[in-house]
Image: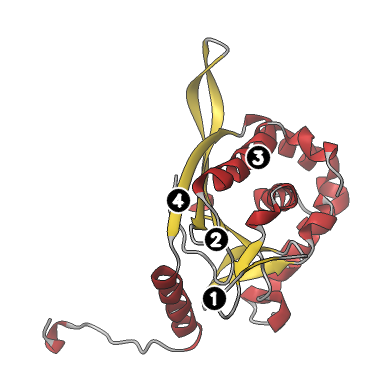
Amino acid sequence: MPSADVRERVPLKGIRQIIAQRMGESVHTTARVTLIREVDATDLVVWREGLKKQFGESWGFAPGYNELLAMICSNALREFPYMNARLSADGEAIEYLTHVNVGVAVDTNRGLLVTVMRDADKKGLKELGTEFRELVARVRSAKSAPSELTGGTFTITNLGMFNVDAFTPVINLPELAILGVGRIVPKPVVKDGQIVVRHMWTLSLVFDHRLVDGAPAAKFLNHLCELIEDPQLLFLTKR
């Protein structure tokens, strides 16, 4: 295209340059596979509404889906530790990680940044919700410490608030996998032989096939869906 047809030329620098480099590296070095699953989130929606009514005032915030997903994913990462892994720096080994550090992608005016909740599997919902809101406030005001933006072992990226149904996110290196989250939509579905309206949620699990095969990754995704469909199962495992 002739240069005269270019309306504006913006240098690729700063955070945008780092994002471009990391996303390009991820796409060109990983063997990405995407598993897509529609899950019935009706019970989770009802549970969240109950939590909001019961604890919203005393906690100072209404529990959100991002911290609920952080709790659910950290539980699943403990149940399926082969998903809490990375490729070694020399590319010669798979490293299974001790800590479960869940990152959540946050839209900022500087670009998409991932805030990390460390040892998420050891924290309750109130602690995760409080920490997440503090992390988001700092990253959006450019006051994050480097440790708050690094060290994740699994990332959640949620575009549901933008009315996106499903998408295939790029793995946040050096992590093994990332979960793409769409919007929750009331839909008619068949349940127990009857057509009923349920709150359906589309999840996209993108993983690096070099480090894990499709069947084990599907088992992990199925466990996530089981916890979403019946959130009381969270209390049957040790945190």
Q: Secondary structure at mark 4?
A: strand
**Left/right of residue 14 with respect to residue 239 in the rendered view:** left
Q: Quadrant of residue 231?
A: top right
Q: Residues within 10 Å of mark 2 (few under 14, many from 20)?
A: some
Which residue is under mark 1?
A: 91
Q: Secondary structure at mark 2?
A: loop
Q: Earlier in the sequence, mark 2 or mark 1?
A: 1
Which residue is under mark 4?
A: 34
**Left/right of residue 164 with respect to residue 43 in the rendered view:** left
Marks 1 and 3: which is nearer the front?
1
Q: Earlier in the sequence, mark 1 or mark 3?
A: 1
In this view, 203 is above or below 61: above
Which residue is under mark 3?
A: 223
Note whether residue 60 is visible: no
- Nearest to the observer: residue 95 or residue 1: 95
Q: Amino acid at mark 2?
A: Leu
Q: CA distance from mark 1 to mark 3?
A: 29 Å
Residue extending furthest front? Answer: 92
Q: Check residue 213 in the rendering and tell me which mark sits there, or answer none.
A: none
Q: Residue at x 56, y 26 (%)?
A: 198
Residue 137 x, y percent position in the rendering: 69, 71
- Nearest to the observer: residue 116 or residue 34: 34
**Left/right of residue 147 with respect to residue 18 in the rendered view:** right
Q: CA distance from mark 4 to mark 2?
A: 14 Å
- Nearest to the observer: residue 211 or residue 5: 211
Q: Amino acid at mark 3?
A: His
Q: Residues within 10 Å of mark 1 (few under 14, many from 20)?
A: few
Q: Check residue 211 in the rendering and tell me which mark sits there, or answer none.
A: 2
Q: CA distance from mark 4 to mark 3?
A: 16 Å
